[in-house]
């Protein structure tokens, strides 16, 4: 149902009595929006002699073949469809709530009448949804949906998928509060609070970011195997949000920070233990991996040269 344009049908009765038996149909409208009272009458070739609408017994509009009279306060807010007797009422206010009656006098035949009860409800404001940034491993995170009215229905979704109660998901205060337990990185998503009443619907959103890591770093060597007097690159990587900062140590001596350590021309003095440390200042986690280079001699490619082939021994520790 489109909340901006609510259509209702009036059950119209043909009777010999002046007003007949009026059938009440309760409908709901939203403050500031429109509604249309739609009859079940099909247009005919002969126009109605007259169509009249009233609310709570007070005149709204009467239209005859030759003239139309409208109550001044409805002049800019109503449109009468004479072919069917339907009435559009625009820019609803709370004062528009009440019983609406229609009386139609056909060119020939019996008088037709019908009624509907309209209840105008307040427009739902856009809800405010709060979900503070979180870190992986937190025991819980709480979402709050505030629309100023605890009576409105509230439903939660994550990336457009409905959320249901589980061992990790709980709802409090008539779904006003969503509690997520055992926070992990896969909980990063867009969360929506869908607020509705009988006539209106609004959505509030928030993007939950779960910070995590760094995971245990991995080190790659290029080229592998490496050769003495050639360039060697050690690359360190770790899954982390925000991205981790990297530092290197060689035999416990600090090196230039960064995810890569480059040796322009490899010689025997470069053999040993290289420690890559990944740090995430937001989560406070620091994780390291040790990478060991060992050398073994091979036959020389020339009479006065010696090629040192380095083999990679992976030693990982946290």
Image (cartoon, rainbow, N blue to C red):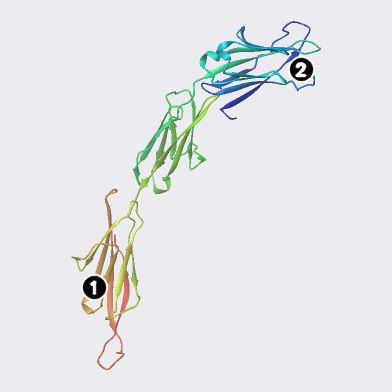
Residue for point 48% across, 26% down: 124
Asked if the residue at tag 1 contacts the one at tag 2, i.e. Cβ–Cβ closer than 8 Å, the answer is no
Is residue 265 depicted above or below 193 in this figure? below
Which label sits in the foreground, 2 or 1?
Answer: 2
CA neighbours of label 2 inside 10 A, class few (<14), some (14 to 19), many (20+): some
Outermost residue toward the right in this view? 108
The residue wearing badge 1 is 272
Is residue 285 depicted above or below 38 in this figure? below
Residue for point 46% across, 37% down: 192
Secondary element under disc 2, as helix, strand or loop, is loop
User: In which quadrant is the N terminus drawn?
Assistant: top right
Q: Which mark is residue 314?
A: none
The residue wearing badge 2 is 47
Horizontal side of residue 88 vs 203, given as left or right: right
Camera-nearest residue between 24 and 55: 55
CA neighbours of label 1 inside 10 A, class few (<14), some (14 to 19), many (20+): some
Camera-nearest residue between 19 and 286: 19
Horizontal side of residue 229 vs 98, given as left or right: left
Q: Earlier in the sequence, mark 2 or mark 1?
A: 2
The picture places residue 51, in percent across and down from the top left corner, at 70, 13
The picture places residue 279, in percent across and down from the top left corner, at 27, 55
The picture places residue 300, in percent across and down from the top left corner, at 29, 90
- Spatial CA distance of label 2 from label 1 is 101 Å
Is residue 221 depicted above or below 280 in this figure? below
Residue for point 34% across, 50% down: 212
Secondary element under disc 1, as helix, strand or loop, is strand
Horizontal side of residue 96 vs 243, given as left or right: right
Outermost residue toward the bottom in this view? 303
The picture places residue 175, in percent across and down from the top left corner, at 46, 30
User: Residue 271 occupies which quadrant of the picture?
Assistant: bottom left
């Amino acid at each position: 149902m489109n909340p901006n344009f609510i259509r209702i049908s009036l059950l119209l009765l043909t009777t010999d009595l002046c007003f007949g038996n009026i059938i009440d149909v309760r409908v709901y409208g939203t403050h500031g929006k429109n509604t249309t009272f739609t009859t079940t009458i099909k247009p005919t070739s002969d126009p109605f002699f007259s169509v009249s609408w009233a609310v709570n017994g007070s005149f709204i509009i009467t239209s005859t073949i030759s003239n139309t009279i409208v109550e001044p306060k409805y002049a800019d807010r109503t449109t009468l469809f004479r072919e069917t007797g339907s009435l559009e009422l625009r820019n609803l206010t709370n004062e528009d709530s009440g019983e609406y009656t229609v009386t139609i006098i056909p060119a020939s035949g019996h008088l037709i009448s019908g009624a509907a009860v309209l209840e105008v409800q307040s427009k739902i404001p856009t809800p405010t949804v709060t979900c503070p940034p979180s870190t992986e491993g937190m025991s819980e995170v709480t979402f709050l949906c505030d629309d100023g009215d605890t009576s409105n229905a509230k439903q939660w979704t994550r990336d457009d998928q409905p959320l249901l109660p589980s061992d990790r998901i709980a709802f409090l205060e008539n779904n006003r509060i969503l509690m997520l337990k055992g926070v992990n990185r896969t909980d990063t998503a867009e969360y929506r609070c869908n607020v509705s009443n009988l006539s209106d619907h609004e959505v509030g959103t928030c993007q939950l970011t779960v910070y995590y890591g760094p995971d245990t770093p991995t080190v790659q060597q290029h080229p592998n195997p490496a050769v003495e007097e050639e360039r060697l690159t050690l690359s360190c990587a770790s899954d982390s949000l925000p991205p981790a900062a990297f530092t290197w140590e060689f035999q416990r001596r600090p090196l230039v920070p960064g995810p890569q350590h480059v040796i322009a021309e490899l010689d025997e003095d470069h053999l040993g233990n290289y420690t890559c440390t990944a740090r995430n200042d937001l989560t406070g986690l620091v994780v390291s991996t040790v990478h060991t280079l060992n050398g073994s001699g091979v036959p020389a490619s020339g009479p006065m040269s010696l090629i040192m082939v380095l083999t990679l021994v992976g030693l990982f520790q946290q």
